[in-house]
Amino acid sequence: MAFRLGRTICTPMNAPGATVTPLRPKRPCPECGRPSAREHYPFCSARCKNVDLNRWLTGAYAIPVRDDEDEDGKPANETPSGSQD
């Protein structure tokens, strides 16, 4: 057996002086600015989380688009190459 009794391989997290490094930095809530809560991250509460969700669902948040470009990224006023009228 590779395991030896009485020898500690790693320090238990409840040992004196043990520290836990958070996985992500603490950030303020994007809705109200209060510190974020772990169970509602990145928000501070279920209320702020729902307010943000409501804004997405009602279309208050939108990704801007430019009307002067065609689907392929070329300006709409250019004619396709090879077709001259």
Image (cartoon, rainbow, N blue to C red):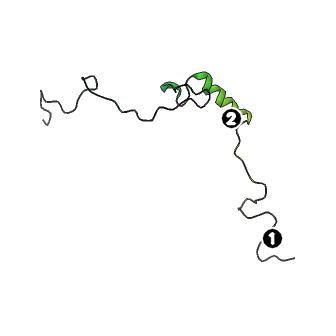
For label 1, the residue is 79
* Amino acid identity at mark 1: Thr
Image mark for residue 4: none
Name the dominant secondary structure of the magenta segment. Answer: loop
* Amino acid identity at mark 2: Trp
Query: Which one is in front, 50 or 25?
Result: 25
Q: Residue at x 65, y 30 (%)?
A: 52
x, y percentage for residue 82? 78, 77
For label 2, the residue is 56
The N terminus, quarter of image: top left
x, y percentage for residue 78? 80, 69
x, y percentage for residue 29? 56, 29
Q: Is residue 40 above or below residue 66?
A: above
Q: Is residue 29 magenta?
A: yes
**Which segment did they paint magenta?**
25-31
Q: Is residue 59 above or below residue 15?
A: below
Q: Residue at x 28, y 26 (%)?
A: 13
Mark 2 closeness class: few <14, some 14–19, many ≥20 residues within 10 Å? few
